[in-house]
Amino acid sequence: MTIPLIDPFRRPISYLRVSVTDRCDFRCVYCMSENMTFLPKRDLLTLEELDRLCTSFVRLGVEKLRITGGEPLVRKGIMTFFDAMTRHLESGALKELTLTTNGSQMDRFASDLYAAGVRRVNISLDTLDDAKFAQITRWGRLPQVLKGIDAAQNAGLRVKINTVALKGFNEDELFSLTSWCASRDMDLTFIEVMPMGDIGNEDRLGQYWKISDLRARLAERFTMTDLVERSGGPARYVRLNETGQKIGFITPLTHNFCESCNRVRLTCTGELYMCLGQEDMADLRAPLRANPASDAPLEQAIRAAISRKPKGHDFDYSRQSVDGRVSRHMSHTGG
Ligand code: SAM
Ligand code: SF4
């Protein structure tokens, strides 16, 4: 029997987030600069290599796969990969296959994703105002994403909306976004902005809207029941008694969530990051490419990496500079 992955702090690793591309059809101001240089294609893992890697992780006990990016649905042939993962759902080894998307391509993919076994998707949406949407995503257009959300729900996918909390940008939409999600039976998670990568001239500290402040404003209008359920990640959940909807708060900078961390992140070039907030990583592409006929060296490399998973991250906004900042972009590690 295969021994499952357990890190030095006795945390079982059951959740893998996989970035399948660093490319995107949007240029959200907190995520990318307008003129991004993307990786050369040869550096990317092929769809077959992604399959081998994910399959190894599933063999080692990973039960949940979240596909992300960049924008996962702009990766050419991506359905081949989703379809390949279906076999792990069917065998019962994989409990959940899911993705985080900006929704722009959802209209084309929703029913195929459902057919592949995907049941829940996270769709990112920071505003319901056309002009603000174009401003924050630079290249995105709101109607396209709303169409994608319709398509996802029509296909039977449960949709959760992810909203980055941005000071002076969507503070005024807190209640309209919440009630819009409630009216469509969608849960909603607010994410605190994180110091990732060089994003050009944007003033990140200016964008920072503390989730505790957001939560306090929500409490002015709604009564909240804390939910005990934890995802093993940085999200806390409450239920709004008035609407019944679930609201999540992701506060990687102000809360210590590391003690229950069950996840690792794989980049589209095969680097495994054991912690979102640390620079240490393991190159899994080399053992993968050097051993086309055996996954044993790859599995050894995975185990060695997990044995180095750190206890926690170092983000710190408490001084007026961004310390503990990580130089890579979120689209590289996979948000
Ligand atoms: N393109 C897809 C999307 O936007 O959903 C998947 C990748 S994106 C990097 C994943 C999530 O990370 C999105 O919800 C996005 O809003 C969030 N994100 C990106 N940059 C961030 C940052 N600097 N701080 C906090 N969240 C960020
Ligand atoms: Fe693209 Fe997602 Fe980053 Fe926006 S947050 S630029 S949609 S990868």
Image (tube, rainbow, N blue to C red):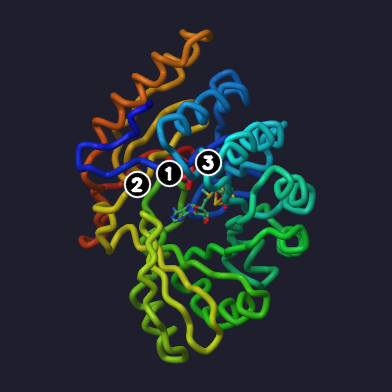
Query: Is there a contact, CB below 8 Å, between mark 2 and mark 1?
Result: yes
Viewer-nearest residue: 21 or 186: 186
Tell me the element at label 1: strand
N-terminal of the two: label 3 or label 1? 1
Label 2, residues with CA under 10 Å away: few <14, some 14-19, many ≥20: many
Q: Which mark is residue 262?
A: 2
Tell me the element at label 2: loop
Nearer to us of marks 3 and 2 is 3
Q: Which mark is residue 94?
A: 3
Query: Is 98 situated above or below 165?
Result: above
Tell me the element at label 3: loop
Label 1, residues with CA under 10 Å away: few <14, some 14-19, many ≥20: many
Write the residue at 55% across / 38% down.
36
In the image, residue 196 lies at what x, y percent?
Answer: 39, 47
Query: Is there a contact, CB below 8 Å, between mark 3 and mark 2?
Result: no
Label 3, residues with CA under 10 Å away: few <14, some 14-19, many ≥20: many
| Residue 171 shown left or right of residue 261 in the figure | right
Disc 1 marks which residue? 15
Query: Is 119 situated above or below 153?
Result: above
Q: Quadrant of residue 317?
A: bottom left
| Residue 106 shown left or right of residue 262 in the figure | right
Amino acid type at image mark 3: Leu
In the image, residue 29 lies at what x, y percent?
Answer: 53, 54
CA gap, disc 2 and disc 1: 6 Å
CA gap, disc 3 and disc 2: 15 Å
CA gap, disc 3 and disc 1: 10 Å
Quadrant that contains the N terminus: top left
Nearer to us of marks 3 and 1 is 3
